Amino acid sequence: MVAIHRYTDLFRQALRIRRVEEKIIALYPQDKIQSPVHLSIGQEAVAVGVCDSLRRSDLLSTTYRGHAFYLAKGGDLNRMMAELYGRANGISGGKAGSMHLAAPEVGLMGASAVVASGVPHAVGAALAARLRKSDQVNVTVFGDGATEQGVYHESLNFAALQQLPVLFICENNELAVHAKPAQRQAYAILDHARAYGIEATHIDNGHDFVVVADRVAAAVETMRRDGRPRLLEIMTCRYREHVGPGEDFAAGYRARADIEAWRQRDPLITDRSLAERLQPDIDAEIAAAVAFAEAGEWPGPADLLSDVL
């Protein structure tokens, strides 16, 4: 019974994320969304699985493809939608948009449009946790393309050298925009992390939020005791184009069959009865968030230079 309840809870969180992003797709042609969007459709299981065992006090940094992690960590949907609309009642007063979501009240340190920039922030937060003698876990989420950045290598080295409680999560969809790993990487992500002495684990079925949640929970529980860094490489698949609401099969870098193989294992698609049962309440919440955004005021001239350092 507990297992069924847990599956349903994780399923609902993942479905909520997908329905939010499907609503964004529907709204986008109307020019109501005031920023570019990087959708996580197909990757929701990673976000809900990672966040399931995290406390509000555990800090998480994510990427510009951050809607899923913002919602899974507990960010407010109304304020997120208002931010996408560019309204003053958004998370950052309408100035940050989709690519820079943050919710410090629930431990989401923030997203960044700069590839791999959240990685050293999480390492710094882990150093602070170590100095405070806290059992806080600090998580950084990044794509496989981010592992090619120099700051990623430096961060692994420092975290290993200082033995810091940072959990590196690689959302590996095997794409950096349109480029495959064989075109970009002369190393294996797991072997590279292990070269620094960091325990690294591969999760092949990143569509299964229960598997992801169990593996992350085990890592987090151990990290709270020993305070050492770890890396999880979670294989996943984005169904939509790199940036924007559409599909991109015409670009020629992947085939529709690549996506269909994942869709056939996707619980949000295969478990239709549960999706149909949960969807009405989720859709009502999303409709209320859209109404909240559309009722919001636009930032005024006085807001132009506020919060600018």
Image (cartoon, rainbow, N blue to C red):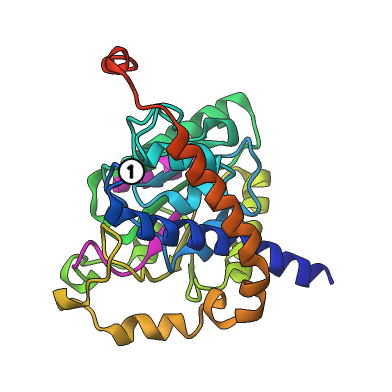
- Front residue of this view, candidates 191 and 212: 212
Farthest residue in the right direction?
1
- Front residue of this view, candidates 126 and 140: 140
* Figure disc tally: 1
For label 1, the SS is helix
Query: In the rendered view of the protein, which quadrant contains the N terminus?
Result: bottom right
| Residue sitting at x 58%, y 42% | 137
| Residue sitting at x 51%, y 38% | 292
Magenta residues (range): 152-178
Residue 1 falls left or right of residue 309: right
Query: In the rendered view of the protein, which quadrant contains the C terminus?
Result: top left
Residue 19, position in %: x, y?
50, 61
| 276 lies above or below 137 | below
| 273 lies above or below 29 | below
Visible in this render: residue 203? yes
Q: Which residue is mark 1?
A: 99
Residue 250, position in %: x, y?
16, 77
- Front residue of this view, candidates 245 and 227: 245
Residue 38, position in %: x, y?
32, 54
| Residue sitting at x 64%, y 31% | 134
Q: Amino acid at mark 1?
A: Met
Residue 177 part of the magenta-drawn span: yes
Residue 25, position in %: x, y?
36, 60
| 26 lies above or below 302 | below
